[in-house]
Amino acid sequence: RAPCASEVPSPVAQRRWRAPYHVSVPLLLGVHARGAGDPTYAVDRTGAVWRTARTPDGPGTVRLAVESDVVAVASWGPGAAWLVEMAPSWLACDDDLTGWAPDSPVLRDGARRFSGPRLGRTGLVMEALIPSILEQKVSGAQSRSSWRWLVRRYGEPAPGPAAGMAVVPEPSAWAAIPSWDWHRAGVGPQRSATAVRAAGLAARLEQAASMTSAQADARLRAVPGVGAWTAAEVRQRALGDADAVSVGDAHVPRMITYALTGQVSDTDEDMLAALEPYRGHRFRVQRVLELSGVPTPRFGPKYSPHDFRGM
Protein backbone atom coordinates (compact mmCIF):
# COMPACT_ATOMS: atom_id res chain seq x y z
CA ARG A 1 0.00 0.00 0.00
CA ALA A 2 1.07 3.61 -0.47
CA PRO A 3 2.14 4.97 2.93
CA CYS A 4 0.31 7.93 4.43
CA ALA A 5 2.33 11.13 4.60
CA SER A 6 2.54 10.95 8.38
CA GLU A 7 4.04 7.44 8.17
CA VAL A 8 6.84 8.22 5.74
CA PRO A 9 10.28 8.49 7.36
CA SER A 10 12.69 10.98 5.84
CA PRO A 11 14.66 9.52 2.93
CA VAL A 12 18.30 8.73 3.47
CA ALA A 13 19.06 10.22 0.04
CA GLN A 14 17.07 12.13 -2.55
CA ARG A 15 17.44 14.20 -5.69
CA ARG A 16 15.43 15.88 -8.43
CA TRP A 17 16.50 15.11 -11.98
CA ARG A 18 15.31 16.78 -15.16
CA ALA A 19 15.59 14.45 -18.13
CA PRO A 20 16.23 15.88 -21.60
CA TYR A 21 13.42 13.67 -22.95
CA HIS A 22 9.94 12.62 -21.90
CA VAL A 23 10.02 10.18 -18.98
CA SER A 24 7.32 7.69 -18.05
CA VAL A 25 8.67 5.94 -14.97
CA PRO A 26 6.25 2.96 -15.13
CA LEU A 27 7.01 2.49 -18.82
CA LEU A 28 10.76 2.50 -18.31
CA LEU A 29 10.82 0.38 -15.16
CA GLY A 30 7.94 -1.96 -15.94
CA VAL A 31 10.33 -4.37 -17.65
CA HIS A 32 11.66 -5.25 -14.18
CA ALA A 33 8.30 -6.21 -12.68
CA ARG A 34 7.82 -9.96 -12.39
CA GLY A 35 4.04 -9.98 -12.52
CA ALA A 36 1.38 -8.65 -10.19
CA GLY A 37 2.37 -8.97 -6.57
CA ASP A 38 6.12 -8.84 -7.21
CA PRO A 39 7.45 -7.95 -3.74
CA THR A 40 10.31 -5.94 -5.27
CA TYR A 41 8.15 -3.65 -7.47
CA ALA A 42 5.01 -1.59 -6.92
CA VAL A 43 3.15 1.37 -8.38
CA ASP A 44 1.20 3.49 -5.92
CA ARG A 45 -2.02 5.43 -6.44
CA THR A 46 -0.11 8.54 -7.56
CA GLY A 47 1.69 6.62 -10.32
CA ALA A 48 5.03 6.62 -8.49
CA VAL A 49 7.14 3.47 -8.85
CA TRP A 50 8.62 1.84 -5.76
CA ARG A 51 11.46 -0.63 -6.19
CA THR A 52 13.75 -2.53 -3.88
CA ALA A 53 17.26 -3.63 -4.77
CA ARG A 54 20.33 -5.21 -3.28
CA THR A 55 23.00 -2.71 -4.26
CA PRO A 56 26.80 -2.95 -3.82
CA ASP A 57 26.26 -0.91 -0.63
CA GLY A 58 23.44 -3.06 0.73
CA PRO A 59 19.65 -3.23 0.51
CA GLY A 60 17.60 -0.20 -0.43
CA THR A 61 14.18 1.05 -1.43
CA VAL A 62 13.67 3.78 -4.01
CA ARG A 63 10.62 5.80 -5.04
CA LEU A 64 10.61 7.49 -8.44
CA ALA A 65 7.90 9.86 -9.62
CA VAL A 66 7.51 12.61 -12.21
CA GLU A 67 6.57 15.90 -10.58
CA SER A 68 6.19 18.93 -12.86
CA ASP A 69 8.46 17.41 -15.53
CA VAL A 70 11.15 16.61 -12.97
CA VAL A 71 11.84 13.10 -11.68
CA ALA A 72 11.75 13.11 -7.89
CA VAL A 73 13.87 10.31 -6.43
CA ALA A 74 13.82 9.33 -2.76
CA SER A 75 15.57 6.34 -1.25
CA TRP A 76 15.96 4.53 2.07
CA GLY A 77 18.36 1.97 3.50
CA PRO A 78 22.12 1.32 3.24
CA GLY A 79 21.88 1.33 -0.56
CA ALA A 80 20.06 4.68 -0.73
CA ALA A 81 22.91 6.82 -2.04
CA TRP A 82 23.78 4.25 -4.72
CA LEU A 83 20.17 4.06 -5.87
CA VAL A 84 19.81 7.83 -6.09
CA GLU A 85 23.06 8.08 -8.07
CA MET A 86 21.93 5.35 -10.48
CA ALA A 87 18.39 6.65 -10.99
CA PRO A 88 19.11 8.48 -14.29
CA SER A 89 20.68 5.30 -15.70
CA TRP A 90 17.64 3.30 -14.62
CA LEU A 91 15.59 5.89 -16.53
CA ALA A 92 17.63 5.51 -19.73
CA CYS A 93 19.96 8.53 -19.64
CA ASP A 94 22.76 6.29 -21.01
CA ASP A 95 20.67 4.93 -23.87
CA ASP A 96 22.08 5.59 -27.35
CA LEU A 97 19.47 5.79 -30.10
CA THR A 98 22.05 6.40 -32.84
CA GLY A 99 21.03 4.41 -35.90
CA TRP A 100 17.51 3.76 -34.66
CA ALA A 101 15.32 4.41 -37.69
CA PRO A 102 12.01 2.54 -37.50
CA ASP A 103 10.71 2.19 -41.04
CA SER A 104 7.49 0.20 -40.68
CA PRO A 105 4.14 1.62 -39.55
CA VAL A 106 3.95 -0.52 -36.42
CA LEU A 107 7.47 0.47 -35.32
CA ARG A 108 7.01 4.15 -36.14
CA ASP A 109 3.75 4.24 -34.23
CA GLY A 110 5.26 2.38 -31.28
CA ALA A 111 8.35 4.60 -31.22
CA ARG A 112 6.08 7.65 -31.10
CA ARG A 113 3.76 6.27 -28.42
CA PHE A 114 6.47 4.84 -26.17
CA SER A 115 9.21 7.47 -26.49
CA GLY A 116 11.75 5.44 -28.39
CA PRO A 117 11.32 3.24 -26.50
CA ARG A 118 14.29 4.17 -24.37
CA LEU A 119 16.01 1.43 -22.39
CA GLY A 120 17.44 1.85 -18.93
CA ARG A 121 20.16 -0.15 -17.20
CA THR A 122 20.21 -1.11 -13.54
CA GLY A 123 23.82 -2.28 -13.21
CA LEU A 124 22.52 -5.20 -11.09
CA VAL A 125 23.19 -8.59 -12.66
CA MET A 126 22.01 -11.08 -10.04
CA GLU A 127 18.76 -9.17 -9.61
CA ALA A 128 18.01 -9.88 -13.27
CA LEU A 129 19.62 -13.31 -13.50
CA ILE A 130 17.82 -15.30 -10.79
CA PRO A 131 14.26 -14.50 -11.95
CA SER A 132 15.32 -15.14 -15.55
CA ILE A 133 16.55 -18.59 -14.52
CA LEU A 134 13.22 -19.22 -12.83
CA GLU A 135 11.47 -18.32 -16.10
CA GLN A 136 13.29 -20.94 -18.16
CA LYS A 137 10.88 -23.25 -20.00
CA VAL A 138 7.88 -22.68 -17.72
CA SER A 139 4.79 -20.51 -17.92
CA GLY A 140 4.88 -16.93 -16.76
CA ALA A 141 2.37 -17.68 -14.00
CA GLN A 142 4.59 -20.45 -12.65
CA SER A 143 7.79 -18.43 -12.62
CA ARG A 144 6.14 -15.40 -11.04
CA SER A 145 4.63 -17.51 -8.29
CA SER A 146 8.04 -19.07 -7.61
CA TRP A 147 9.70 -15.65 -7.51
CA ARG A 148 7.15 -14.23 -5.06
CA TRP A 149 7.41 -17.24 -2.75
CA LEU A 150 11.22 -17.31 -2.67
CA VAL A 151 11.73 -13.56 -2.26
CA ARG A 152 9.20 -13.34 0.56
CA ARG A 153 10.68 -16.36 2.35
CA TYR A 154 14.40 -15.66 1.88
CA GLY A 155 14.58 -11.93 1.23
CA GLU A 156 14.33 -9.24 3.86
CA PRO A 157 11.81 -6.47 4.56
CA ALA A 158 12.29 -3.39 2.41
CA PRO A 159 13.93 -0.42 4.16
CA GLY A 160 11.81 2.66 4.65
CA PRO A 161 8.05 3.01 4.20
CA ALA A 162 7.47 0.35 1.51
CA ALA A 163 5.03 -1.75 3.53
CA GLY A 164 4.84 -5.35 2.36
CA MET A 165 7.77 -5.10 -0.05
CA ALA A 166 10.96 -7.14 0.20
CA VAL A 167 14.56 -7.04 -1.01
CA VAL A 168 15.89 -9.98 -3.01
CA PRO A 169 17.98 -12.49 -1.03
CA GLU A 170 21.72 -12.01 -0.98
CA PRO A 171 23.74 -14.55 -3.04
CA SER A 172 24.66 -16.67 -0.02
CA ALA A 173 20.96 -16.98 0.83
CA TRP A 174 20.08 -18.11 -2.70
CA ALA A 175 22.89 -20.68 -2.52
CA ALA A 176 21.68 -22.03 0.83
CA ILE A 177 18.03 -22.63 -0.10
CA PRO A 178 17.35 -26.32 0.62
CA SER A 179 16.05 -28.59 -2.10
CA TRP A 180 12.66 -28.98 -0.43
CA ASP A 181 12.00 -25.24 -0.53
CA TRP A 182 12.90 -25.02 -4.20
CA HIS A 183 10.37 -27.85 -4.58
CA ARG A 184 7.75 -26.01 -2.52
CA ALA A 185 8.29 -22.94 -4.70
CA GLY A 186 7.57 -25.03 -7.80
CA VAL A 187 11.13 -24.85 -9.14
CA GLY A 188 12.48 -28.00 -10.78
CA PRO A 189 15.96 -29.39 -10.05
CA GLN A 190 17.57 -28.12 -13.25
CA ARG A 191 16.58 -24.50 -12.65
CA SER A 192 17.35 -24.62 -8.93
CA ALA A 193 20.81 -26.07 -9.62
CA THR A 194 21.49 -23.29 -12.12
CA ALA A 195 20.39 -20.64 -9.63
CA VAL A 196 22.62 -22.09 -6.91
CA ARG A 197 25.61 -22.22 -9.28
CA ALA A 198 25.03 -18.61 -10.31
CA ALA A 199 24.76 -17.51 -6.67
CA GLY A 200 28.15 -19.07 -5.96
CA LEU A 201 29.63 -17.01 -8.80
CA ALA A 202 27.80 -13.78 -7.95
CA ALA A 203 30.88 -11.59 -7.54
CA ARG A 204 32.22 -12.52 -10.98
CA LEU A 205 28.82 -12.27 -12.60
CA GLU A 206 28.17 -8.79 -11.23
CA GLN A 207 31.29 -7.65 -13.09
CA ALA A 208 29.37 -8.23 -16.32
CA ALA A 209 27.49 -4.97 -15.71
CA SER A 210 30.62 -3.00 -16.66
CA MET A 211 31.60 -5.18 -19.63
CA THR A 212 30.80 -4.91 -23.31
CA SER A 213 27.73 -6.79 -24.43
CA ALA A 214 29.79 -9.59 -25.97
CA GLN A 215 31.95 -9.93 -22.86
CA ALA A 216 28.90 -9.96 -20.59
CA ASP A 217 27.22 -12.57 -22.74
CA ALA A 218 30.29 -14.82 -22.54
CA ARG A 219 30.61 -14.33 -18.78
CA LEU A 220 26.96 -15.21 -18.18
CA ARG A 221 26.86 -18.19 -20.53
CA ALA A 222 29.92 -19.69 -18.86
CA VAL A 223 27.55 -20.72 -16.06
CA PRO A 224 26.12 -24.19 -16.86
CA GLY A 225 22.39 -23.81 -17.39
CA VAL A 226 22.58 -20.19 -18.57
CA GLY A 227 22.00 -20.06 -22.32
CA ALA A 228 21.41 -17.42 -24.96
CA TRP A 229 17.88 -16.57 -23.83
CA THR A 230 18.73 -16.13 -20.15
CA ALA A 231 21.87 -14.10 -20.91
CA ALA A 232 19.86 -11.81 -23.20
CA GLU A 233 17.21 -11.24 -20.53
CA VAL A 234 19.93 -10.14 -18.12
CA ARG A 235 21.71 -7.91 -20.64
CA GLN A 236 18.42 -6.19 -21.45
CA ARG A 237 17.90 -5.15 -17.84
CA ALA A 238 21.30 -4.88 -16.20
CA LEU A 239 23.17 -3.41 -19.19
CA GLY A 240 20.36 -1.74 -21.13
CA ASP A 241 21.54 -3.68 -24.20
CA ALA A 242 19.40 -2.48 -27.10
CA ASP A 243 20.49 -5.42 -29.28
CA ALA A 244 19.86 -8.28 -26.79
CA VAL A 245 16.89 -9.87 -28.55
CA SER A 246 15.35 -12.85 -26.75
CA VAL A 247 16.61 -15.72 -28.91
CA GLY A 248 15.09 -19.02 -27.84
CA ASP A 249 11.84 -17.54 -26.53
CA ALA A 250 8.60 -19.48 -26.98
CA HIS A 251 6.61 -16.47 -28.25
CA VAL A 252 8.94 -13.65 -29.33
CA PRO A 253 10.02 -15.10 -32.74
CA ARG A 254 6.43 -15.38 -33.93
CA MET A 255 5.53 -11.89 -32.69
CA ILE A 256 8.51 -10.23 -34.37
CA THR A 257 8.43 -12.20 -37.62
CA TYR A 258 4.71 -11.67 -38.11
CA ALA A 259 4.85 -7.95 -37.26
CA LEU A 260 7.76 -7.24 -39.59
CA THR A 261 7.05 -9.63 -42.49
CA GLY A 262 3.44 -10.80 -42.19
CA GLN A 263 4.70 -14.40 -42.17
CA VAL A 264 3.94 -16.85 -39.36
CA SER A 265 7.10 -18.50 -38.07
CA ASP A 266 8.33 -19.70 -34.68
CA THR A 267 11.99 -20.01 -35.65
CA ASP A 268 14.84 -17.87 -34.38
CA GLU A 269 16.34 -17.97 -37.88
CA ASP A 270 13.34 -16.25 -39.46
CA MET A 271 13.13 -13.75 -36.60
CA LEU A 272 16.81 -12.82 -36.88
CA ALA A 273 16.49 -12.45 -40.65
CA ALA A 274 13.57 -10.05 -40.17
CA LEU A 275 15.54 -8.12 -37.56
CA GLU A 276 18.77 -7.84 -39.54
CA PRO A 277 18.03 -4.29 -40.81
CA TYR A 278 17.74 -3.23 -37.14
CA ARG A 279 20.99 -4.75 -35.91
CA GLY A 280 22.14 -2.78 -32.90
CA HIS A 281 18.52 -2.17 -31.89
CA ARG A 282 16.96 -5.62 -32.13
CA PHE A 283 15.76 -5.68 -28.54
CA ARG A 284 14.39 -2.17 -28.99
CA VAL A 285 12.24 -3.57 -31.81
CA GLN A 286 11.13 -6.39 -29.52
CA ARG A 287 10.23 -3.92 -26.77
CA VAL A 288 8.21 -1.72 -29.15
CA LEU A 289 6.20 -4.71 -30.30
CA GLU A 290 5.68 -6.02 -26.75
CA LEU A 291 4.42 -2.64 -25.58
CA SER A 292 2.25 -2.26 -28.68
CA GLY A 293 0.52 -5.59 -28.04
CA VAL A 294 0.83 -6.70 -31.65
CA PRO A 295 -1.56 -9.64 -32.22
CA THR A 296 -0.18 -12.79 -33.81
CA PRO A 297 -1.92 -15.93 -35.12
CA ARG A 298 -1.89 -18.82 -32.65
CA PHE A 299 -1.97 -22.47 -33.59
CA GLY A 300 -1.28 -25.74 -31.85
CA PRO A 301 -2.06 -27.06 -28.38
CA LYS A 302 -2.04 -24.78 -25.38
CA TYR A 303 1.04 -25.12 -23.16
CA SER A 304 0.37 -27.31 -20.09
CA PRO A 305 2.83 -26.47 -17.32
CA HIS A 306 4.33 -29.08 -15.00
CA ASP A 307 3.65 -28.58 -11.31
CA PHE A 308 6.88 -29.63 -9.62
CA ARG A 309 5.27 -29.31 -6.20
CA GLY A 310 3.12 -32.36 -6.93
CA MET A 311 6.04 -34.60 -7.82
Image (spheres, rainbow, N blue to C red):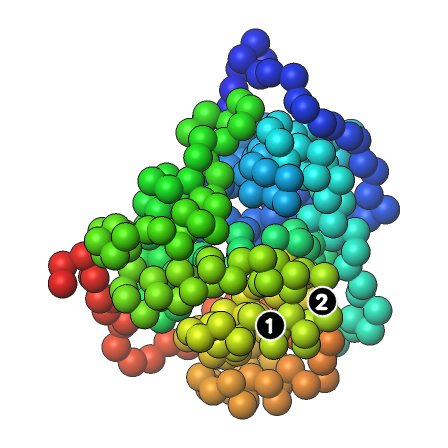
Residue 271, how many percent across, how many down? 56, 84
Secondary structure under the numbered disc 2 in the rendered image = loop
Left or right of 213? Residue 16 is: right
In depth, the one of 261 and 9 nearer the eye is 9
Residue 205, how many percent across, how many down? 58, 63
User: Separation of disc 2 and disc 1 at Cα?
Assistant: 9 Å
Residue 97, how many percent across, how many down? 80, 65
Which amino acid lies under the numbered mark 2 shown in the image of this protein? Met
Whether residues under marks 2 and 1 lie with C-beta atoms below 8 angstroms apart, the answer is yes
* Other-residue count near label 2 (Cα within 10 Å), few / some / many at <14 / 14–19 / ≥20: few
For disc 2, the marked residue is: 211
In depth, the one of 149 and 72 nearer the eye is 149
Left or right of 226? Residue 11 is: right
Can residue 237 be spotted in the picture?
no
| Position of the C terminus by quadrant | bottom left
Please name the residue shown 22% across and 66% down the image.
306
In depth, the one of 256 and 122 nearer the eye is 122
Total numbered circles: 2
Please name the residue shown 36% across and 57% down the image.
143
Residue 87 occupies which quadrant of the picture? Answer: top right
* Marked residue nearer the N-terminal end (2 or 1): 2
Left or right of 40? Residue 25 is: right
Residue 232 occupies which quadrant of the picture? Answer: bottom right
Most distant residue in the top direction: 6
Secondary structure under the numbered disc 1 in the rendered image = helix
* Other-residue count near label 1 (Cα within 10 Å), few / some / many at <14 / 14–19 / ≥20: some
For disc 1, the marked residue is: 219
Q: Which mark is residue 286?
A: none
Which amino acid lies under the numbered mark 1 shown in the image of this protein? Arg
